[in-house]
Image (tube, helix red, strand yellow):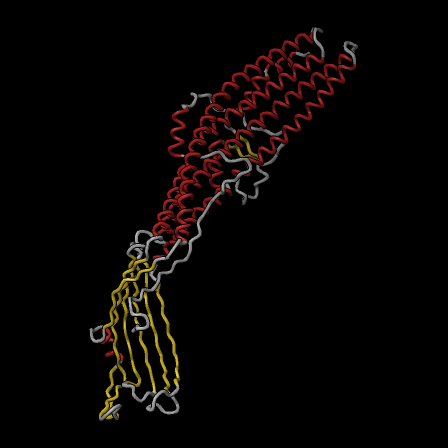
């Protein structure tokens, strides 16, 4: 064989290292090229990855739920304006055959609110009316009335410490915090996936170079065999064997190019902006070199860090607190519903007042007009007060819905606590496994590098023996295959080492992404609309005012 060919063969190990550190290159590829470092890939993923965008929007959804839950404490304004007519049949001798005709024009405006502490509710309302009637014993026609009412209701046992509105708000706030943690967890998982995809692309592109050089070696051997067969130095079968090996190496190169294209698409999907018109046309050129082997990780320190701050453990703690809040709420709902009810109402009257003389009902001897302003002012004087103070009590007899619900909540709280213990064990095991993986892959890289060097030496020796007629095409081909396998094995172990480092860094903050899983996983809570009730005071049933 010629000296140029031998020199090329002896440089394979050096070329393999260069393939891992040099920019990627696809033959005859004229697409626009994006030279990409690992940090650039991570930054692009955080900015453009659609799965992360979904999770980020999920945090906004949880923030909106907090706003929904706070709506339970928002003052509610209400008003009504109406007109009514009531014609009653005659019920006494004073009313004619036409009955009593009552026409009413009225309005009522009020505000009520649930307080964010103590579960008390207050209401303030103001009402006015103008009434006309043909009732012969009426003192006013028309009658102008005005009044205001202030009422307050305060639970003393049930709902005082925690009620449905405050339970919703507390849980919604924790869920918002959990959604922020879930987003950070998704960022960690996405960054890990990007790094894995980056190193996979780097390795597959390097494998293309290895397969290309292997094909060149086989083609050179086939060319040399063709010359020797023509000279009668070797049998034609050796040429057939060499050409068959060329065909096999060419197929391997095709597979390597396809794998590199798939790896490029996986990385592209993670980092590229789908709205970019050049999304599928841009060729990615990973320029980062392999990581230098550093100090082996401190397993105990890594486990302690994971148990203290891993996002899934913190989120599980929020779930436990939510379960405790629910249990506390349902336990409070078992208490008697004892409420202090108070109210005050001031009233005023105006209109055209009939002045009567004589016996009952008396004849109208004159009128006196009192304006609506008089009625309004009178409502804020103690002339016609109506007030009430009382306590209402209600309590279910026998087993209640709250009893069964609290028992269920207690079980769910224990489940949440056990889940934290399970996650802690799982986190410790995962981190320890990741640390062992870093150590074992680092040792495998050393072994694979030594294997590649020895395979290179064996190939060179077999080449020299072949030149002097002491070897055969079969042995040279076998030495080429062994060298190819050793180079591919070095690429794979280098990729495994980079992947183990990425995984070790990620599992200390977030659990590994399950196969076939995604980064969405947002679990929200439904917010039930809880408008504040309207306190009305305490009055004798049927009495009213």
244 sits left or right of 29 in the view: right
Q: Nearer the viewer, residue 392 or 494?
A: 392
| Image x and y of residue 22, in percent | 54, 25
Vertical position of residue 469 compared to residue 101: above or below: above
Q: Nearer the viewer, residue 63 or 324?
A: 324
Quadrant for the N terminus, please.
Answer: top right
Quarter location, residue 80: bottom left
Q: Position of residue 184 (x, y in %)?
A: 43, 39
The image quadrant where one finds the C terminus is: bottom left
Q: In the orientation shown, which residue stands out farthest toward the left?
A: 382
Which quarter of the picture shows residue 356? bottom left
Residue 86 occupies quadrant: bottom left
Left or right relative to 162: residue 483: right
Relative vertical location of residue 45 with respect to residue 503 in this rendering, above or below: below
Q: Position of residue 291 (x, y in %)?
A: 48, 24
Q: Is residue 233 above or below residue 178?
A: above
Relative image position of residue 260 (x, y in whole percent): 60, 30
Extreme residue toward the front, this view? 398
Q: What residue appears at the point 63 percent right and 21 percent down from the top-left corner?
A: 213
In this rendering, would 237 be left or right of 139? Answer: right
Q: How many marks?
A: 0
What residue is shown at x 62% (from left), y 13% (from top)? 7
Q: Residue at x 79, y 14 (%)?
A: 236
Q: 5 left or right of 539?
A: right
Residue sitting nearer the eye, 27 or 406 = 406
């Amino acid at each position: 064989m010629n000296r140029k060919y031998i020199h090329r063969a002896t440089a394979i190990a050096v070329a393999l290292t260069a393939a891992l550190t040099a920019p990627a290159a696809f033959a005859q590829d004229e697409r626009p090229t994006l030279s990409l470092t690992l940090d650039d890939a991570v930054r692009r993923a955080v900015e453009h990855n659609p799965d992360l965008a979904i999770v980020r929007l999920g945090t906004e959804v949880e923030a909106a739920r907090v706003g929904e839950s706070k709506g339970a404490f928002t003052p509610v304004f209400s008003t009504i304006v109406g007109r009514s007519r009531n014609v009653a049949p005659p019920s006494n001798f004073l009313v004619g055959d036409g009955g009593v005709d009552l026409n009413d024009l009225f309005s009522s405006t009020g505000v009520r609110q649930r307080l964010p502490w103590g579960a008390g509710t207050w209401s303030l309302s103001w009402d006015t009316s103008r009434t006309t009637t043909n009732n012969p014993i009426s003192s006013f026609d028309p009658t102008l009335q005005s009044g205001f009412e202030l009422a307050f209701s305060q639970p003393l046992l049930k709902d005082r410490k925690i009620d449905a509105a405050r339970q919703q708000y507390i849980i919604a706030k924790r869920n918002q915090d959990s959604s922020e943690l879930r987003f950070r967890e998704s960022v960690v998982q996405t960054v890990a996936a990007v790094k894995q995809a980056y190193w996979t692309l780097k390795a597959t592109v390097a494998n293309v170079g290895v397969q290309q050089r292997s094909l060149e070696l086989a083609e050179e051997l086939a060319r040399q065999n063709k010359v020797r067969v023509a000279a009668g130095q070797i049998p034609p079968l050796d040429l057939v064997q060499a050409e068959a090996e060329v065909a096999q190496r060419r197929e391997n190169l095709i597979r390597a190019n396809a794998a590199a294209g798939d790896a490029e698409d996986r990385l592209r999907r993670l980092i590229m902006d789908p709205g970019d018109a050049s999304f599928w046309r841009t060729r990615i050129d990973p320029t980062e070199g392999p990581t230098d082997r550093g100090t082996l990780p401190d397993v105990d320190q890594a486990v302690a860090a994971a148990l203290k701050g891993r996002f899934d453990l913190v989120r599980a703690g929020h779930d436990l607190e939510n379960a405790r809040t629910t249990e506390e709420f349902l336990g409070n709902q078992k208490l008697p519903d004892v409420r202090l009810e108070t109210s005050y109402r001031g009233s005023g009257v105006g209109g055209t007042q009939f002045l009567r003389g004589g016996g009952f009902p008396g004849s109208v001897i004159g009128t006196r007009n009192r304006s609506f302003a008089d009625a309004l002012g009178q409502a804020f004087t103690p002339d016609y007060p109506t007030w009430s103070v009382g306590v209402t009590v209600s309590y279910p007899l026998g087993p209640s819905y709250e009893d069964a619900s609290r028992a269920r909540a207690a079980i769910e709280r224990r489940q949440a606590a056990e889940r934290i213990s399970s996650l802690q064990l799982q986190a410790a095991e995962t981190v320890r496994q990741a640390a062992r993986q870093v150590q074992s892959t680092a040792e495998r890289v050393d072994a694979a590098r030594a294997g590649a060097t020895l395979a290179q030496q064996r190939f060179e020796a077999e080449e020299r023996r072949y030149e002097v007629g002491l070897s055969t095409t079969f042995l040279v081909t076998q030495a080429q295959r062994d060298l190819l396998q050793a180079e591919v094995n070095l690429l794979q172990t280098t990729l495994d080492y980079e992947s183990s480092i990425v995984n070790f860094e990620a599992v200390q903050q977030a659990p590994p992404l399950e196969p076939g899983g995604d980064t969405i996983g947002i679990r929200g809570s439904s917010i039930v609309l809880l408008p504040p009730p309207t306190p009305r005071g305490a009055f004798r049933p049927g009495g009213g005012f």
